[in-house]
Image (cartoon, helix red, strand yellow):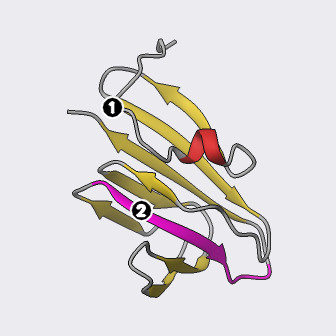
Amino acid sequence: MASAVPGPALERDPVKLDPQHYTVELENDRVRVVRILYGAGEKSPMHQHPPGVVVFVTDGKFKFDFPDGTSEAIEKKAGEIMYFAEKWEHQPESLTGERFEAVYIELRP
């Protein structure tokens, strides 16, 4: 079993701001693995993610609103992967009519 080791603090940690949608599955000095679950049409508050990899467990279609006022539509199939090289911030809204699941693997320096 991995022990919890705090990583770099996020000003807007999704696990703290929105535990309904974000749950820590594993945390150590190298990674924090966060399970993401959304119901149909659900929305989250603006939050940040550190550099990492997200693995889509189910198909997903989202609208991401960014702090600068822009937005982007994201559509991914189950099994697809996205990599984020830097810390980023967004407010997601599920645009699907079904439950969505993903796993975000936060990389620690």
10 Å neighbourhood of mark 2: few (<14), some, or many (≥20)? some
80 vs 102: above or below? below
Image coords of residue 76 (percent x, y): 50, 78
Identity of the residue drawn at 75% across and 48% down: 20
The mark found on residue 39 in the picture is none
Q: Which residue is mark 2?
A: 89
Q: Is residue 63 left or right of residue 55?
A: right
Residue type at mark 1 is Pro
Question: What label sits on residue 8 in the rendered view?
Answer: 1
Q: Is any atom of residue 11 visible in this view?
A: yes
Using residue 90 as the reference point, say whether residue 7 is left or right of it: left
Does the magenta portion include 60?
Answer: no
Mark 2 secondary-structure assignment: strand
Q: Tag 1 or tag 2, which sits nearer the N-term?
A: 1
Measure the alpha-carbon separation of dots 2 and 1: 15 Å
Front one among 16 and 61: 16
Q: Which quadrant would residue 84 be assigned to in this image?
A: bottom left
Which residue is pictured at 20% across the width and 33% down the height? 109
Image-based side of 95 in relation to 71, left or right:
right
Q: Is residue 49 above or below residue 98?
A: above
Q: Which residue type carries mark 2?
A: Glu
Q: Quadrant of residue 92?
A: bottom right
Q: Over which residues does the magenta segment extend?
A: 87-97
In which quadrant of the rendered view does residue 80 lie?
bottom left
Seen at 41% across and 21% down, the residue is 6
Residue 56 position within the rendered picture, expressed as x and y whole percent measured from the top left: 52, 63
> Is residue 88 one of those drawn in magenta?
yes
